[in-house]
Image (cartoon, helix red, strand yellow):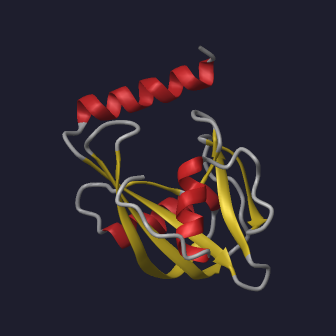
Amino acid sequence: MDLKRLRGRLFHLWFLLSRPMTLGVRVVVHDREKDALLLVRHTYVGGWHLPGGGVDPGETMVEAARREVLEETGLEIRALSLVSTHLNTAASRRDHVLVYLAHDFSGAPRAQQAEIAELGFFALTNLPTETTIATRRRIAEIFDGVPGSDHW
C-alpha cells in the first residue's frame, strides 16, 4: 500500500473513532462564463474532488461550505444553493454529505493548505481522468439531468 493510501485510511480511521456521525459539505463551484468547475486534488487521497470538508461544531452547513472553499482554494463564496444530500458509506456508515452549488464567488483560486496538492477550473466536457466516480456522479446529476442518488 502506498503512503498516500495509508494516510487516507488512517485519516478515515481517526474520524471513525472520534466522531459517532460525520456531516460534510461539498461545493460545486461553477464558472458560468467558462462553463468550468473547480476541482481539488488532496495530498492524502487520490483523485480530483469537489472542494469541501467537515462541518465543525456550532457551524451551519452553509458556513462550513463557505469556510472549506475559502480554506482550500482562496475563493470567497457569496451565494450557495443546496442541491442534494447523500449517505457516504465508502468511509463508514455514518458519513452524510450535503452538496451545494455556487455560481457567485470572488478571488483567484490558489491552494491554501498543505492538504491540497493541486486545484483548477476544468471545462465540464474535459474533466481530469482521475476525477472520482462520486464527483462525476454529482456533476452528472446537476448538469446532465441524471437521476440523483441518496448514496455518495
Q: Position of residue 124 (x, y in %)?
A: 73, 69
> Which residue sits at x=19%, y=40%?
20
Q: Nearer the viewer, residue 80 or 106?
A: 80
Give the residue displayed 47% in from the left and 70% down from the top.
147
Q: Is residue 151 above or below residue 91?
A: below
Q: Position of residue 81 (x, y in %)?
A: 44, 81
Q: Find residue 58 and report its image quarter.
A: bottom left
In the image, is 152 to the left or to the right of 110?
Answer: left
Q: In the rendered view, does 61 fall on the left or right side of 110? A: left
Farthest top residue in view: 1
**Residue at position x 77%, y 85% from top?**
33
Number of numbered labels in the structure image: 0
Image-based side of 91 in relation to 45, left or right: left
Judge whether residue 50 can be spotted in this image: no
For image coordinates 66% across by 46% down, the residue present is 41
> Does residue 12 lie above or below 2 as drawn?
below
In the displayed structure, 115 sits above or below 39; it is above
Q: Is residue 44 visible?
A: yes
Q: Which quarter of the rendering shows the N terminus?
A: top right
Q: Residue furthest left?
A: 20
In the rendered image, residue 104, in percent from the top left (x then y), is placed at 59, 84
Give percent across and percent down for residue 83. 43, 75
In the figure, 78 relative to 137: above or below? below
